[in-house]
Image (cartoon, rainbow, N blue to C red):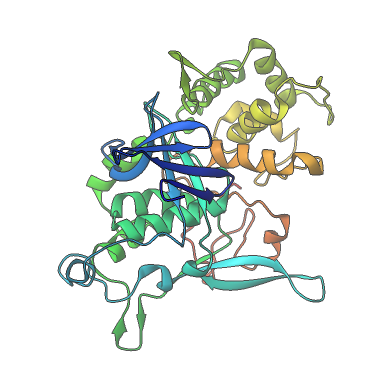
């Protein structure tokens, strides 16, 4: 009716009730929320969002059907935004798809064509960006562009770059400049083409540094990993929601160091939600002891392939994305959720950089991923 509004967003429902006195009550599913413009931290601030009524956690809702009222003067002002074209139309992402012959192929799509509905929870007090899928990153990047929030754009682009086969940018077509101003500076900074110490100071704290324990013994390193894992968790009643148990720590050490290839654990022991992300975090680190054991007497490993039962694939993907995209500021690695991404020419495993690569590689070898 005229006093109730219901909108379906991603896997939830946004309900808005207006009483006879024009007071508004908003709920996501059955949980009460408030409209807010939140200050997350020094890097990301003043982001319009939904805040839970009973906690400081927030929801970022993105949809191509949301209209943003940005005045034309500000939107096209060359001295401020420096853009006469919408940035989402100047960015392309290489996507994996199955063609009519049931073969996997690649195609570049403008970012604006890939945007869907999603909601992303950001937990207090750290407000570290965690996503459950690459699609959420695409949606959040579009949201940052629509909000003209350059800092949120930079943070999301850092993670999207790690989760993409390839990203392409169209800064210019002929004599027409399409990407300029602070947006071009932001893209150059994320790609490593331009240095900015001020940005480094702002965005470095948004990434957990697991490379700080390079020379730690495996037991100490596992404890440090679990401390980082705990920082990703939501705070409930003054305590973090999930904290790895001594049994889970011991099992993780066994997987890393034991000579056997197969390890079994009972149902409900946290293999998908705890052990899997911790193991991936260990692999993406530079800990010498862990990588020496993972080598099993051979060469260092540069690629980790995770195989899980089909019914666990969505949950496993979500856990890896949540915990593995916000690690090691400026570390060069990739996380793919489709093994067929390895067929693309720009996906290099343990190889030196080539001119065809869209990404800057660290000298001396390829990234871990």
Farthest residue to the front: give it.
20
- Which quadrant would residue 145 be assigned to in this image? bottom left
Image point (66%, 51%), residue name = 337
Q: Is residue 276 above or below residue 184?
A: above
Find residue 56 and report its horizontal and vertical position in percent. Answer: 36, 27
Would residue 299 appear left or right of 194 to someone viewing this image?
right
Would residue 217 appear left or right of 52 to someone viewing this image?
right
Find residue 348 and report its horizontal and vertical position in percent. Answer: 62, 59
Image point (30%, 43%), residue name = 44
Pick whichever, 299 or 152, lies toward us: 152
Count the marks: how many?
A: 0
Q: Is residue 54 above or below residue 87?
A: above
Farthest residue to the bottom: give it.
174
Farthest residue to the top: give it.
246
Image point (55%, 54%), residue name = 135
Would residue 311 appear left or right of 132 to someone viewing this image?
right
Q: Is residue 60 above or below residue 174?
A: above
Find residue 250 and report its horizontal and vertical position in percent. Answer: 69, 15
Find residue 131 and report its horizontal and vertical position in percent. Answer: 52, 43
Q: Is residue 330 visible?
A: yes
Pick whichever, 347 or 143, lies toward us: 143
Q: Is residue 72 above or below residue 165?
A: below
């Amino acid at each position: 009716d005229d006093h109730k509004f219901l909108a379906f967003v991603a896997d939830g429902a946004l309900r808005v009730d207006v009483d006879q006195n024009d007071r508004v009550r908003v709920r996501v599913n059955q949980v009460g929320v408030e409209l807010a413009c939140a200050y997350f931290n020094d890097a990301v601030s003043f982001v319009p969002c939904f805040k839970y009524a009973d906690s400081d956690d927030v929801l970022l809702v993105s949809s191509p059907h949301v209209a943003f009222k940005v005045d034309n003067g500000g939107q096209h002002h060359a001295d401020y935004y420096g853009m006469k074209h919408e940035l989402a139309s100047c960015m392309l992402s290489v996507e994996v798809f199955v063609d009519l012959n049931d073969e996997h192929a690649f195609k570049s799509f403008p970012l604006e064509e890939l945007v869907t509905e999603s909601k992303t929870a950001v937990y207090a007090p750290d407000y570290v960006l965690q996503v459950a899928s690459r699609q959420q990153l695409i949606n959040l990047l579009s949201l940052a562009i629509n909000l003209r929030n350059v800092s949120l754009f930079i943070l999301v682009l850092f993670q999207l770059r790690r989760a993409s086969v390839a990203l392409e940018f169209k800064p210019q077509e002929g004599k027409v400049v399409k990407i300029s101003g602070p947006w071009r500076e932001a893209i150059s900074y994320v790609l490593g083409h331009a240095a900015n110490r001020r940005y480094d100071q702002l965005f470095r704290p948004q990434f957990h540094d697991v490379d700080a324990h390079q020379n730690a013994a495996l037991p100490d390193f596992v404890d440090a990993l679990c401390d980082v894992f705990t920082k990703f968790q939501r705070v409930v009643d003054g305590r973090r929601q999930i904290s790895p148990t001594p049994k889970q720590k011991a099992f993780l050490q066994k997987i890393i160091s034991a000579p056997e290839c197969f390890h079994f654990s009972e149902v409900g022991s946290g293999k998908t939600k705890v052990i899997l992300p911790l193991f991936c975090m260990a692999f993406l680190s530079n800990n010498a002891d862990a990588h020496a054991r993972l080598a099993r007497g051979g060469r260092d490993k540069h690629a980790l392939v995770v195989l899980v039962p089909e019914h666990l694939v969505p949950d496993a993907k979500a856990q890896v994305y949540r915990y593995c995209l916000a690690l090691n500021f400026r570390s060069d690695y990739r996380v793919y959720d489709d093994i067929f991404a390895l067929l693309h020419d720009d996906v290099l495993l343990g190889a030196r950089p080539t001119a065809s690569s869209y990404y800057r590689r660290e000298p001396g070898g390829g990234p871990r991923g």
